[in-house]
Image (cartoon, rainbow, N blue to C red):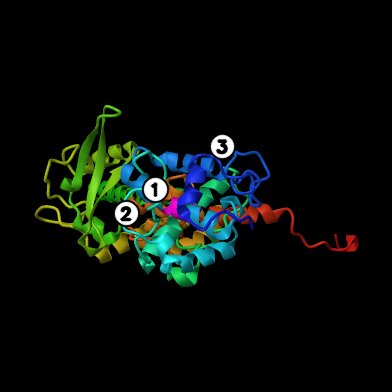
Amino acid sequence: MTALTTTPNAAFALALTATLPPSLDGSSGENRGMGRQQIAASTDWDAIRLWLGQYTDQKKTYDAYEKEVVRFYVWVLANRGKPLSSVVYEDWETYLAFLADPQPRSVWVGTKRGRHDKDGGVSKEYRPFAGPLGPSSIRYAQGIIWSMCEWLRSVGYLAGNPIIRNRRRMKKPKRSQSRFLTEDQWRAVLAAIEELPLDTILQRHQHARWRWMATLFYITGVRTAEAINATMGSFGSLYDREEARTRHFLTVIGKGDKERAIPIPDSFLPEITRYRQAFGLSSWPAPGETTPLVFSLRTKSGYRSLTRQSVWTVFKEIFKHAETVLARHDPDAASKLLAASTHWMRHTAATEMLNAGVDLRTAQAILGHDSIATTSIYSHTEDLRLHRDINDKHRIQRPKSEE
C-alpha cells in the first residue's frame, strides 16, 4: 500500500485537483483492462466522472450516485492506500463493515452539509457520513457502486468487477435463470397470437386481448395487481420542452400503495389504439376514463376488470399455444413454456430492459423495486461474460486415439 492520509478531505482534494501520485490515481491500477477501452479516461477519477456524466440531466439521481461513489472512492484512497482500479473483493467486504460503523468517527462522521469552503476548496470540516448506515442504505450503496464498476468493466476500463454481490448480506432470493422467456420463446408467443383465427367477433376479441396483454406486460413489467386495478384513464402525458414533444406514461398503484408513473415507449402507443378500437372504443382514452386496463370478453353490461386468476388463465393459454409453435423447431425450449406463468412476463421485461442497456436505476424505477439490488438480479451480463471467457479456453484434452 502507498501511504496517503487518514482524512477523506485530503484524499478528495488531491483527486479533484488531479494531484494524486501515479501509484494512486489509477493510471497503473492492478485491475485495469488490458484491451481497447471505449472511454478515454486514464485515471480513476476521470472514469468516475464519465460514469456520473450520464446522469447530469437527472439532478436527484446524480447527487445520490455522486455521494455514494465519492464516499467509496475517498475511503479506498484514505483507508486502503490504493487506487480504485486496484480494489479487490476483500476491500469491498471491509467497506461494507465500515459502512455499518464508520471509524474513526471524528474523521468520517459529521453534520456539516457541503464539501467546499468559501474559497471553493474541499472544506476541512467535510465528513462523508452523518452516521452509521442501516441495512437498506448499505444495500442501496452496494447497488450503485456495483453498477458503476460494472459499467467501467463493460467499457474496458476495469478488467473485472470486484464488487461481488454478497447474497448473505443482501438477503435476496437467488437469481433464477429460467423464470423468464428467452428471445425464441417470446417470439413464439408473438407468433402464436398472430396464428389465432379471426373469423368471428369473439375470435377477433380474443386475438386483440392476447396481443394487448402480452405486449402490455412485456413493455411495462407491470405486476398483475397493478394491471387489474388500473383503468384506461391511468394513461397520461407530459410535454417535454427540451425535445418539444409529448411523452406518455401509465400511472399504477404498486406495493405499499405507492403510485408510480411507468414511461410508455412510442412504439407501444399504436397498441393502445389497436386494442381499444377492436372493442369499439375511441382511439385514445378520455381523461379520467374508468374502462379497465384489462377487461373480460364476456360481459353483458359495460366492461369488467379481469381477476388475478383470469389474468393467470389467459397467460397460461397464450403460453400453451406458444409451446405448440416453438415445438416445430425447438421441442426442448418449447416444453419449458408450459411452466411459464404471468410473473414470467415481469421477469422477462426486467431482463430485456437490462440486456438492452437500460440503466439499472431506470429499470428499478419502472419496475417499482424498493432496492436496486432486487433489479440487479435480472442482469445476466456477468454470466455471459464468464461463459465467453471460458468457452474456448477450458476443454477436455482427450487422447488423439479417442478423437
User: In the rendered structure, are the residues bearing label 1 and label 3 in contact, judged by CB atoms less than 8 Å apart?
Assistant: no
- Residue receiving disc 2: 112
Mark 1–mark 2 distance (CA, rounded to whole Å): 10 Å
Q: Where are the magenta residues, as a range? A: 68-73
Query: How packed is label 1: few (under 14 Cα within 10 Å), some, or many (20 or more)?
Result: some
Residue 34 painted magenta: no
- Amino acid type at mark 3: Ile
Label 3 SS:
loop
Query: How packed is label 2: few (under 14 Cα within 10 Å), some, or many (20 or more)?
Result: few
Which residue occupies the foreground of this view, 377 or 50? 50
Asked if residue 26 shows in the view, the reply is yes
Return the disc, 1 or 2, that comes first in the chain's sequence: 2
- Which residue does the image show at 31% across and 58% down from the upper left? 111
- Residue receiving disc 1: 123
User: In the rendered structure, are the residues bearing label 1 and label 2 in contact, judged by CB atoms less than 8 Å apart?
Assistant: yes
- Amino acid type at mark 1: Ser
Return the disc, 1 or 3, that comes first in the chain's sequence: 3
Mark 2–mark 3 distance (CA, rounded to whole Å): 35 Å
* Side (left or right) of 287 relative to 132: left
Task: State which quarter of the image contains the C terminus.
Answer: bottom right
